[in-house]
Image (cartoon, coloured by chain):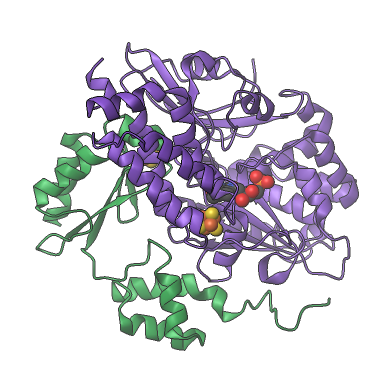
Chain colours: A purple, B green
Amino acid sequence: MFEPILTQNIDRPDSEKIATYLANGGYTAFKQALNNFTPEELVDKVKRSGLRGRGGAGFPAGVKWGFMPKDSQIKKIVAVNTDEGEPGTFKDRQIVERDPHQIIEGVLIASYAVGASRAYVYIRGEFFLGVKRWIKAIADAYEYGYLGKNICDSDFSLDMSVHRGAGAYICGEETAMLESLEGKPGNPRMKPPYPTQTGLFGLPTLVHNIETLACIPHIVLRGAEWFASIGTSESKGPKIFSVSGHVKRPGNYELPLGTPLSEIIFEHAGGMSSNRKLKAIIPGGASTPVLTADQVDTPMAFETLERAGSQLGTGGIVVMDESTCIVEVARRTTKFFAHESCGRCVPCRIGSVRLYETLDRIEHGFGLPDDIERALYISNNIDGNTFCPMGDALVNSARSTIKKFREEYEYHIKEKKCYKDHQ
Amino acid sequence: MIENPKLHVDKPRSRAMLLAALYIAQEQYGWLSQEAIQRVADRLNLTPGEVYSTASFYTMFRLQPQGQYRVQVCEGLSCYLVGGAEPIADYISNRLNINPGETSADGKITLEIVQCLAACDYGPAIKVNDELYGNITEVGLNEILIELLSK
Ligand SMILES: Cc1cc2nc3c(=O)[nH]c(=O)nc-3n(C[C@H](O)[C@H](O)[C@H](O)COP(=O)(O)O)c2cc1C
Ligand code: SF4
Ligand code: FES
């Protein structure tokens, strides 16, 4: 039986308080990091753990730490991404609301390892409770001497503050987040230079998702080898999967990477919410391609999902039963991206709206005979031609549903009504 | 420590305070009127254009007067799958005789359609000002509306 690691404290009473965190061994990993390891050893440890980013892109965390300049004369920053807005994902909200000190400890270790002296937290504006929990946790960490000057009588100092976003999905993209932290509209920046070279206020910046940071204390305490023993060959460690849609028990489930999707849906989430059959699954948040029911045994790991034609993304699993209209799924998802396009580049700004209009027409029985080809043509012209990865993300829903459920699209166009009315 | 003279990290350039300042102004004025925008601009040494173009990028900044309560209905996929989104918005629309984006005649409630609120595990989800409500049913929604209208 797998014992939860990242969510081990969240069901304790007052789990968000510093006293609860300390009573359960909190901040000992940081003290160990400070006293027993050099920054280089910590970077090496995180590299050996195989930890990959949990914010969606899956970049190896230790490698990113290694990109930070070694020059101690240069001021460095850690930026903490709590912007979680990917439809179907709600893991970060839970960690922030219920165990914020675990993240602060991860930030402390990361900052010590890369030589950062300042940490900025960016949190989605809608997370009102999360904002309050972040502010309180940081204030308490200062009071107990885990933030500020000469932490634990060492020469390591770190200041940390919280900054609230104001409702823009794109600000989760790391360079858009940096723009927003600087008080500007959240338009992504050109990469390279990467944030590790030129980030917030032009300074080298290490950006991480909070679930990634929450793994760090455990890697320090229990070792890189222990962490790497969990999961698959290319996907290491525990992962929080958010499950929603047509299941009996929607919620967050922390499990090893590589757990089969079927186990998550039918055992942990209690199976389908009605006696209707499984039809399709979005495995990693709205920007990942759909899987069909016969792919339900796919292990939830980076490499296996890629082979299945999808992505791990954020691990936000949306389960759909046979009553679901697949054109509506694509229409609704594409509407989201059309709404959230930051407007900086044409293929995304215009293409997302044209794609949405096409899907909307098909769904409502006004589809033209060549609309399926049109949707594919628009998608192919967005994919790979945009300034930031949102363009590639936004076509996944339409393109994968057309590929896997083309007959439903054809039915809508031919019969001028929804496929599910016919079942 | 060498710092680029143009970059004051621990005294961030005033621009970095813009979102926080807009939140404060919005709290004080109720919405970001021209006067509020001008005041923020003066305080932070920015042009009103810079302030406005930033405010208008973010959906949580209100550039129009709003009702006392903003009722936001999630139209995300997970909420839709469990009966949320349009049925909920339609119910409120009919009940208050307003379209999404509009405010009820008494100035109490503004109805808005929003994207995923990261509460998909207890959808259908809505938000009233800063408060999140989950597992919304017609009965529950009716109770919330009655309470808001009577306050
Ligand atoms: C459109 C878009 C939205 C994103 N939204 C988020 C988000 O809400 N939270 C997050 O942690 N990462 C998000 N990311 C990924 C970040 O750009 C970045 O890769 C991540 O924060 C790095 O942290 P990690 O290495 O710990 O995953 C988004 C990326 C894109 C392209
Ligand atoms: S791809 Fe979309 S979100 Fe990204 S920069 Fe272009 S317009 Fe903005
Ligand atoms: S889809 Fe409604 S909260 Fe996520």
Residue displayed at 47% across by 86% down: B47
**Residue A124 visible somewhere in the drawing:** no
When asked about the image quadrant of residue B85, the answer is: top left
Q: Is residue A368 left or right of residue A316?
A: left
Residue A170 versus residue A329: which sits nearer the camera?
A: A329
Residue displayed at 62% across by 63% down: A189
Q: Quadrant of the C terminus of chain A?
A: top left
Residue A341 versus residue A173: which sits nearer the camera?
A: A341
User: In the image, residue A44 lies at what x, y percent?
Assistant: 87, 43
User: In the image, residue B70 lies at what x, y percent?
Assistant: 26, 57
What is the residue that sits farthest to the front in this orientation? A369
Total marks shown come to 0
Residue displayed at 37% across by 47% down: B115
User: In the image, residue B126 lies at what x, y percent?
Assistant: 30, 45
Q: Measured along the vertical axis of the image, is residue B23 above or below residue A328?
A: below
**Residue A421 visible somewhere in the drawing:** yes
Q: Measured along the vertical axis of the image, is residue A222 above or below residue A41?
A: above
Q: Quadrant of the N terminus of chain A?
A: top right
User: In the image, residue A205 lies at what x, y percent?
Assistant: 72, 61
Residue A381 versus residue A241: which sits nearer the camera?
A: A381
Q: Is residue B71 left or right of residue B57?
A: left
Residue displayed at 57% across by 43% down: A99
Q: Measured along the vertical axis of the image, is residue B10 above or below residue A119?
A: below
